[in-house]
Amino acid sequence: MPDQKIILTVLGSAGGVAKAILSVLEKSSQDVHDPIHSFIRSCRLHLVDQKQKADAYYQSLFPRLFPQTTLHQFDLNEPGKFRDHLLRTKTTHVIDVSWADTVQMLDCCSELGVKYINTALENTMVDENERLAGYSLLERYRIFEENRARIAKQKPTAIIGSGMNPGVVQWMALDLMKKRPDELPLACYIVEHDDSIYNDPALIQEETVYSTWSPECFLDEAVLNYPMFMKKKLPLMIFGQVYEQDFKVTLGSKTFYGCLMPHEEVITLGKTFDMETGFIYRVSDYMTNLLHAYLEDSDPLWDWEHHVLDPAVGEVGGRDMVGVLLVYPDKEIYKYNVMASSDVYPEYRTNATYLQVACGIYGALSTLLLDKIPEGVYFVDELLLQTESRYGEYLCYYMRDWVEGENPVSDGLLLDRMRLRP
């Protein structure tokens, strides 16, 4: 394939997700066998952040691509500046891993014919409205859907929610469903067990929230939103704290209990298929016990230090397992990926969770560059069902280790799995 010039803008470039996807793109630029190598080795990169990092940070992260890179610092909450940036730089593709308003960013890109990828639905107005605290994900989804038809008239090409979850997990779910094409599962559960924590106890400080991704976003799901799942294509809430109860997950010989968290892929899969859907998530025992201790009053957690587990600070033990569990009347089938930060960091300079997210973004970018995707705004499950995308093939280039298996009996639906914590 001959070189084709693309101009790529990354929004939120100073954050952890951006660091991971830029590390992956650096690999792509040097690997002649990488599916999008010919695009990336000659691309122009524009990195945008409200609080931009120094040149040296990026130069050390991706020395091969750095000479093709320009740094920008401005506030994406002023969409006029973003629109001017797209026009001035002649950007062809945007990867949005910022907290900017999804509808505003997509509007600008659609108007100018720029292809757009993001990892989550964002809306600052919703986040700042305390009355919506328990329902913020549903409200962000509602606002996005209300604007989707209007944006579609501009003939956009966009992939929404392409990280690990949402993103790769929808591909896993559909890939598993192909194994029993004549039978719809009773339920599809996105399951994650991330027991990552520093190996050195001296690095674990008091009054600190630890997460392998944005602690603020984690707390939003863990202590502000109500537990949510989909049933009969409707979102249902459990009116209580997320950490008041947990739910059993069995993956062969591995069993854990996790909490029910609101997530984009739960809504999109649950609206597409008439099956119960939910996201069952367990973090490290340290954080699980801490959050349970603050069930009655979680407000102090917002005033604590918030720390992303970073292998550059100290060795991060544990692993992040993310997968899908499909429940049938007679059995369960599952598929998951496991990564350890101790393996990931030497090669990618990031933690395991962020690399998993980056693989989903890479899959979406590869689809926009290589596949003939009709104009439209797609969640990943819609992309796979409505187009000839090879998304799964692309993401597997860097996410290579998969475990598939079967449970000969089932633990049942969500309420059958529920355990109230003492």
Image: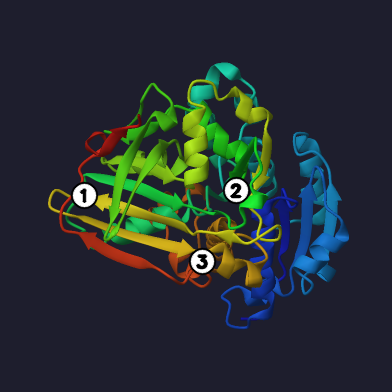
Image coordinates for residue 243, horizontal then vertical, percent: 43, 32
Provide the residue designation for mark 1. 184
- Please say if 368 is above or below 296: below
* Disc 2 and disc 1 in contact, CB within 8 angstroms: no
Could you tell me which secondary element the residue under label 2 belongs to?
A: loop
Provide the residue designation for mark 3. 371
Image coordinates for residue 261, horizontal then vertical, percent: 43, 37
Taking 390 as reference, is 71 left or right? right
Q: Look at the image and tell me in which quarter the C terminus lies.
A: top left
Q: In the rendered structure, which disc, 3 or 1, sits on the residue that comes first in sequence?
A: 1
Q: Which dot, 3 or 2, sits closer to the camera?
A: 2
Is residue 141 something that shows in the picture? no
Q: How is the image coloured?
A: rainbow
- Which of the two residues, 390 or 417, is positioned nearer the viewer here? 417
Taking 16 as reference, is 235 left or right? left
Q: Residue furthest bottom?
A: 32
Q: In the rendered structure, which disc, 3 or 2, sits on the residue that comes first in sequence?
A: 2
Q: In the rendered structure, which disc, 2 or 1, sits on the residue that comes first in sequence?
A: 1
Alpha carbon distance from label 2 to label 1: 33 Å
Taking 191 as reference, is 54 left or right? right
Provide the residue designation for mark 2. 213
Disc on res. 265: none
Count of numbered circles in the view: 3
Alpha carbon distance from label 3 to label 2: 30 Å
- Please say if 236 is above or below 360: above
* Disc 3 and disc 1 in contact, CB within 8 angstroms: no
Q: Residue furthest left?
A: 330
- Please say if 392 is above or below 206: below
Q: Which dot, 3 or 1, sits closer to the camera?
A: 1
Image coordinates for residue 56, horizontal then vertical, percent: 86, 63
Could you tell me which secondary element the residue under label 3 belongs to?
A: loop
- Which of the two residues, 56 or 124, is positioned nearer the viewer here? 56
